[in-house]
Image (cartoon, helix red, strand yellow):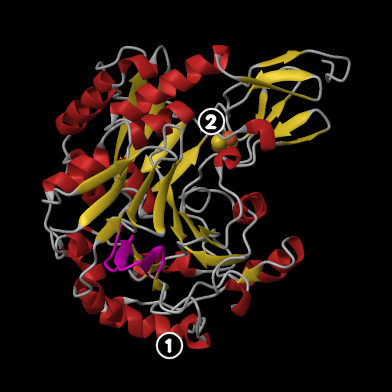
């Protein structure tokens, strides 16, 4: 029996052991060690995202906290708040995931954090007897991580928004902290007719819920803490994304009943920023009101206005040409013979850009080509991208960009070039994933031998649902026909399949 657990409700840590900071932030105090996790307090992604609810009053305590350890899960600004990091004592030991790009190590070294413990997937660190930290990576090209914190047998799994392959998740978890709302621009940043938008949003919300339930079941979690989102958008220009019904940024209430039905016996711990998780006070109804939002917007006015107030020089065609040429030349092997016509529109101007095939040879068409993708990017955001102040990933997450595509099919190569192209270690990993799809590890299910890891982002397909000859990946819910391997929903990348027995679906 876990020490003391018989006297506490399911999944409750010891008093004072785990404190919630809001979003994906925590402090953990155990065995004389204080651990700070993903402290986020300032606007992220081109000044678009703010913590919800407001947690700023906790910042002085966090800065004065005298923490021994700091764990940062990944580089997204709602986890890697440089304004907070800049004010922390450089003597703190940082626990970092070992990513191929070494991005976290480099950024923290540049900030002056010399004491680093860098852990690969499933590697552990024991800073004191009775406290063990185990790193869990998203083992695909994506650079995300979670942390298993073992406090003398009480197992707290902080998955934030990391998608460690389901087959790699640890079990026997007391308390699971994981995202339930979206942190993605699809579909809400896409130009869809209203009804289509509503349908796609509902699908994504349902997929997010399905993924969460799988995580809870596979980890055997006794308690679940809804966390790592949603944010709030304080810039009035982005106010539509605060609609909790019509976006992929719902509040927990939207899922609570279905969760209770799907995971009976799992205690849900709804916490407020500052709560000791042994006795959480929970959410406050007032947070959901327009009055609260309006007062929060007023308090942070200088911060959300900063994006729009900053002076900038518009990006010229030559600068954009040079930027895209560089991006493509870094990713030649990844791009292969792919090509795509893309239209970039920016504050009334428009560029038709032919990407791919001959890397480095960008064609700006005089006459608009018929683009497969249109990306509407404000000049202010484009300037930040071209100057390297943010990447496309951060700019897209800001919801300040708009997208359209025809046909309505996700282009993995284009989006990966934009999202990961600045870190070729990630796109090279995608090349390796593609190659290993042809020759890598296989599993057999329903009379079909198939690649074990999803060709999109590496999920373990041992846990995929199969219905009527169609396999559905449990992570982003792409679907493939098992008789042909054709991708029929989500993207265009095929699945390697080979019939092995009489149960195999026939063509
Ligand atoms: S990992 Fe994205 S659909 Fe499988």
All told, the count of numbered labels is 2
Q: Mark 1 to mark 2: distance in Å?
A: 42 Å
Ligand 1's quadrant:
top right
Secondary structure under badge 1? helix
Write the residue at 26% across / 67% down: 42
- The residue stretch that appears in magenta: 22-46
Q: Position of residue 389 (x, y in %)?
A: 19, 46
Q: Position of residue 102 (x, y in %)?
A: 26, 35
Dividing the picture into quadrants, the one containing residue 67 is bottom left
The answer, for residue 40, to whether it is visible in the render is no
1 vs 2, front mark: 2
Which residue is more in the foreground, 227 or 71? 71
Confirm if mark 1 falls within 8 A of ligand 1: no
Q: Residues within 10 Å of mark 2 (few under 14, many from 20)?
A: many
Q: Residues within 10 Å of mark 1 (few under 14, many from 20)?
A: few
Confirm if mark 2 falls within 8 A of ligand 1: yes
Which residue is more in the foreground, 337 or 447? 447
| Quadrant into which the N terminus falls | bottom right
Which residue is more in the foreground, 103 or 418? 103
Q: Position of residue 181 (x, y in %)?
A: 53, 60
Label of residue 54 in the image: none
Is 35 within the magenta?
yes
Is 121 within the magenta?
no
Secondary structure under badge 2? loop
Residue that label 1 marks: 291
Write the residue at 25% across / 21% down: 330
Residue that label 2 marks: 456
Q: Position of residue 291 (x, y in %)?
A: 43, 87
Write the residue at 19% across / 59% down: 92
Q: Is residue 502 above or below residue 203?
A: above
């Amino acid at each position: 029996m876990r020490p003391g657990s018989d006297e506490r409700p399911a999944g409750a840590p010891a008093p004072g052991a785990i404190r919630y900071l809001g979003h994906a932030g925590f402090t953990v105090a155990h065995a004389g060690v204080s651990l700070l996790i993903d402290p986020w307090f300032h606007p992220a992604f081109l000044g678009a995202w703010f913590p919800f609810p407001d947690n700023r009053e906790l910042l002085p305590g966090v800065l004065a906290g005298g923490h021994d350890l700091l764990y940062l899960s990944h580089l997204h600004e709602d986890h890697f708040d440089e304004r907070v990091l800049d004010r922390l004592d450089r003597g703190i030991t940082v626990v970092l995931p070992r990513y191929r790009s070494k991005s976290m190590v480099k950024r923290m070294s540049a900030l002056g954090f010399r004491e680093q413990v860098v852990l690969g997937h499933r590697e552990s660190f024991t800073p004191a007897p009775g406290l063990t930290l185990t790193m869990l990576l998203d083992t695909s090209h994506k650079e995300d991580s979670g942390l298993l914190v073992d406090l003398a047998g009480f197992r707290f799994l902080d998955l934030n928004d990391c998608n460690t392959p389901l087959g790699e998740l640890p079990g026997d978890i007391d308390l699971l902290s994981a995202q339930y709302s979206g942190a993605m621009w699809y579909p809400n940043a896409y130009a869809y007719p209203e009804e289509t938008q509503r349908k796609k949003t509902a699908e994504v919300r349902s997929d997010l819920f399905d993924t969460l339930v799988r995580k809870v079941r596979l980890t055997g979690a006794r308690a679940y803490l809804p966390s790592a989102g949603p944010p709030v958008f304080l810039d009035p220009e982005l106010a539509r994304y605060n609609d909790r019904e019509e976006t992929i940024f719902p509040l927990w209430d939207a899922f609570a009943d279905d969760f209770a039905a799907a995971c009976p016996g799992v205690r849900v711990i709804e916490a407020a920023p500052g709560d000791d998780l042994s006795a959480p006070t929970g959410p406050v109804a007032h947070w959901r009101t327009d009055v609260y939002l309006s007062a929060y917007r007023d308090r942070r006015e200088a911060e959300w206005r900063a994006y729009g107030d900053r002076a900038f020089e518009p990006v010229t065609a030559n600068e954009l040409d040079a930027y895209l040429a560089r991006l493509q030349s870094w990713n030649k092997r990844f791009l292969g013979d792919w090509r795509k016509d893309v239209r970039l529109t920016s504050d009334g101007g428009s560029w038709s850009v032919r990407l791919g095939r001959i890397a480095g040879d960008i064609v700006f068409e005089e006459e608009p080509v018929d683009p497969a993708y249109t990306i509407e990017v404000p000049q202010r955001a484009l300037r930040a991208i071209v100057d390297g102040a943010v990447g496309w990933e951060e700019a897209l997450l800001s919801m300040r960009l708009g997208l359209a595509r025809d046909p309505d099919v996700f282009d993995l190569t284009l989006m990966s070039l934009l999202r990961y192209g600045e870190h070729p270690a990630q796109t090279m990993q995608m090349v390796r994933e593609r190659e290993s799809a042809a020759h890598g590890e296989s599993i057999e299910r329903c009379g079909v031998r198939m690649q074990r890891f999803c060709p999109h982002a590496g999920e373990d397909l041992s846990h995929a649902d199969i219905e009527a000859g169609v396999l559905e990946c449990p992570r982003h819910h792409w679907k493939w026909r098992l008789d042909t391997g054709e991708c029929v929903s989500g993207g265009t990348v095929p699945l390697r399949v080979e019939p092995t027995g009489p149960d195999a679906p026939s063509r």
